[in-house]
Image (cartoon, coloured by chain):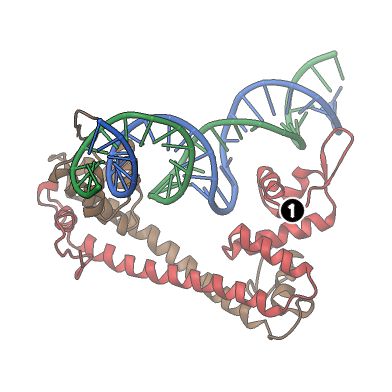
Chain colours: A red, B brown, C green, D blue
DNA sequence: CGAAACCTTGTACCGACTACAGGGTCAAGC
DNA sequence: GCTTGACCCTGTAGTCGGTACAAGGTTTCG
């Protein structure tokens, strides 16, 4: 299987496959006499593994770590779980931060009484208040 | 005020100030005879404005747009609101995606019965199933 | 034989910084 | 007057996970 076929089967770009090889996530395959990469089914499986982890938004460094762990039979499963849990915690923290942002942005948007010129825009007013270090609708008890 | 003082007052790194100048978000200030940047209070206000928008996770390009809009008195307030609302929508979409990820990662973590060796790790098993295109705990009805 | 589709390497780009190298300037203390 | 340390300057490269070229070689089909 050449690189185009592998990429098609995994649903990724050809460049991405080469990128993963460069980053050490995909083993460098053997080459045809003319220098083309020749992949086997084990490469497709590995690539699917990487893509699946990426679909869970794991960074490549962690995916690499997961691959290393899984190839060492002496390693405890707890290390794998710890990695997954740590990632889950980061995702949760990010989601909570975004929830706060949503409230702030909705509040800010509510300041706009449409039809105005920017001179009287409630949104810009709030943002400029904030620039003076004062409280604003989106950051009510901001401590500066 | 020199760059260090400005940066301290706005709570940013000196490099960030120079970066904003290069990116056109902060007007280039006058210079002392020895070439040091000399800032006035209007620069601090602008910098605070930018930082406040950044705290709402707006990309620099949008902040720039906001600055441009706010300096044109003929512009309607609706354009400002539209920009804020579009940003809100992006934040909301991202938050929802992360919520889905949280569920997936929690499900995956629940597959691990601790104390095992990786050979029997439920997490890796699931991930490898997924790499074969089969359904897995974290992506139950995956269509490949 | 020629065109199209494929492959190769190498490089640069995205955002929003951060870090570092290699130098110049300034204020204080001795 | 000299040194020390804190500050400032420019320019460059790195982060992350790719994407997008450019300039060439190979294969495949008609």
Secondary structure of the residue carrying tag 1 is loop
Q: Residue at x 81, y 43 (%)?
A: A2
Name the image quarter holding residue B73: top left
Write down the chain letter for disc 1. Answer: A
Q: Is residue A17 left or right of residue C30?
A: right
How many numbered marks appear?
1
Q: Nearer the viewer, residue B94 or C11?
A: C11
Left or right of residue A47, residue B107 in this image:
left
Left or right of D26: which side holds A102?
Answer: left
> Residue B113, position in %: x, y?
69, 86
For the N terminus of chain B, the quadrant is top left
Give how far across and how far down residue B71 sits, in percent.
Answer: 16, 40
Q: Residue at x 22, y 52 (%)?
A: B48
Residue A53 higher or lower than B107, as above or below: above
Q: Is residue B99 above or below residue A118?
A: below
Q: Quadrant of the C terminus of chain B?
A: bottom right
Q: Residue at x 52, y 71 (%)?
A: B100
B45 sits to left or right of A67: left
Q: Alpha-carbon neighbours of circle 1 within 10 Å: few (<14), some, or many (≥20)?
A: some
- Most extreme residue toward the right, as rendered? A33
Visible residue check, residue A121? yes
Q: Name the quadrant containing residue B33.
A: top left
Which residue does the numbered mark 1 point to in the structure image? A26
* Whether residue B17 is situated above or below residue A127 in the rendered picture: above
Q: Is residue B24 visible?
A: no
Q: Where residue B128 sits in the image (x, y, percent)? A: 74, 69
- Residue drawn at x 14%, y 52% is A121
């Amino acid at each position: 299987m050449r690189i185009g076929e592998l990429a098609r089967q995994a649903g990724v770009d050809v460049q991405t496959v080469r990128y993963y090889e460069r980053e050490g996530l995909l083993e460098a395959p053997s080459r045809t006499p003319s220098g083309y990469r020749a992949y086997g089914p084990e490469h497709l499986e590995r690539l699917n593994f990487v893509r699946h982890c990426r679909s869970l938004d794991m960074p490549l460094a962690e995916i690499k770590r997961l691959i290393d762990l899984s190839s060492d039979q002496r390693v405890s499963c707890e290390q794998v779980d710890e990695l997954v849990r740590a990632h889950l915690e980061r995702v949760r923290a990010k989601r909570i931060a975004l929830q706060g942002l949503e409230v702030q942005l909705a509040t800010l948007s509510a300041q706009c009484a449409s039809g105005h010129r920017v001179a009287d825009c409630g949104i810009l007013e709030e943002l400029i208040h904030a620039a003076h270090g004062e409280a604003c609708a989106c950051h009510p008890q901001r401590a500066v």
